[in-house]
Image (cartoon, grey):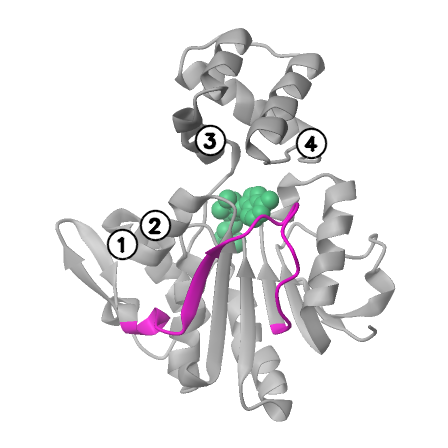
């Protein structure tokens, strides 16, 4: 079993920061350490060998892939999607003809397809513009391709049934060579962009920002900074949805939001 100390973790973060401008300094230490240890095991490297490999730009993609956790599902946490459909989207529609939604940390795009399917079933997909961003450009390519393992579709289908969609998930994809190829017309209005929440700029205003199961990998300092960016990125009375194990209660901008749904971790911006 490999081991690594804090000084070596710092050497790695410093190198990746100065050479590639990715800053993992404020990622949650325990999970960051676990991911580094996994890379050492997978590639059978010592810390010094890993540092050497990191000087090869071609190794960076493998490194990013391992550091970032990309696990995701369609209609993940089905009750959350029911609240979006039944409460949040109708509330936004009351005041806006056009809705703008940002998926921050969209991973391989399952969350974006879930949103698009939900909006199509609500008959309002054409009224919504979606922006999906992630730090990891490889995973963004997967998101754009919209091709998933059929095995994963079993869980996605189960989630969709629990969500109580109006159709069957299989209506939205075709099977080809053992893969599920998603219906691309669902994501015609989606713009996929590489964006780093750590150093990326605030780039627009939105009615709804989803950043689910991303900040769980950040320490409190970084969560605070990122939450400020989300506050800035929302129109007044816009909504922020975070992951079920995350919270906004303790952060600096907490007083500028109210809790709309505590179970599903949905907040509403009430102050600029
Ligand atoms: C566990 S996935 C969450 C996917 C989806 N939101 C969900 O809840 O199923 C976390 C994603 O956050 C992305 N991520 C990690 N650090 C990031 C950063 N600094 N900026 C943008 N995305 C980041 C990872 O690349 C990964 O795709």
Question: Residue 132 appears at what percent x and percent y?
Answer: 48, 61
Q: Is residue 150 above or below residue 96?
A: above
Distance from Cα at disc 4 to Cα at disc 3: 16 Å
Q: Residue 17: name its quadrant.
A: top right
In this figure, which residue is indicated by the disc labeled 1?
A: 147
CB within 8 Å, label 3 to label 2? no
Q: Is mark 2 within 8 Å of ligand 1?
A: no
Label 2 vs 4, first from the N-terminus:
4
Q: Secondary structure at mark 2?
A: helix
Q: Is residue 193 visible?
A: yes
Q: Residues within 10 Å of mark 4 (few under 14, many from 20)?
A: some
Task: Provide the residue designation for mark 3.
Answer: 66
* Of 211 and 262, the residue lying toward us: 211
Q: Earlier in the sequence, mark 3 or mark 2?
A: 3
Whether pointer 1 and pointer 3 mark residues with C-beta atoms closer than 8 Å, the reply is no
Residue found 56% across the figure and 80% down from its top: 89
Q: For label 3, count other residues whose C-alpha is less than 10 Å away and answer few (under 14), some (14-19) or many (20+).
A: some
Task: Give the residue number, with chain letter if any, for mark 2.
Answer: 142
For the residues marked 1 and 3, what is the alpha-carbon distance in whole angstroms?
Answer: 21 Å
């Amino acid at each position: 079993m490999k081991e690594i100390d804090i000084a070596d973790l710092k050497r790695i973060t410093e190198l990746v920061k100065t050479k590639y401008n990715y800053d993992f300094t404020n990622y949650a230490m325990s999970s960051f350490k676990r991911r580094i240890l996994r890379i050492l095991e997978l590639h059978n490297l010592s810390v010094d060998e890993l540092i050497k490999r990191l000087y090869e730009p071609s190794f960076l993609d493998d490194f990013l892939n391992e550091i970032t956790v990309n696990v995701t599902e369609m209609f993940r946490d089905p009750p959350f999607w029911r609240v979006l459909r039944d409460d949040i989207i109708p509330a936004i529609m009351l005041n806006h003809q056009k809705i703008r939604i940002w998926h921050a940390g969209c991973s391989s795009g399952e969350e974006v397809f879930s949103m698009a399917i939900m909006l199509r079933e609500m008959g309002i997909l054409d009224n919504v513009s979606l922006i999906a961003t992630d730090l990891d450009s490889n995973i963004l390519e997967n998101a754009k391709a919209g091709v998933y393992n059929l095995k994963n579709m079993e869980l996605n289908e189960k989630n969709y049934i629990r969500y109580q969609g109006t159709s069957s998930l299989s209506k939205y994809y075709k099977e080809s060579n053992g893969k599920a190829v998603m219906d691309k017309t669902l994501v015609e209005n989606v713009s996929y962009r590489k964006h780093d929440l750590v150093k990326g700029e605030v780039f627009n205003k939105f009615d709804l920002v989803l950043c689910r199961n991303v900040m769980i990998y950040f320490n409190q300092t970084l969560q605070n900074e990122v939450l400020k960016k989300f506050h800035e990125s929302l129109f007044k009375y816009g909504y922020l949805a975070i992951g079920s194990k995350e919270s906004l209660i303790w952060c600096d901008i907490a007083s500028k939001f109210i809790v709309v749904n505590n179970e599903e971790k949905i907040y509403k911006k009430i102050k600029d």
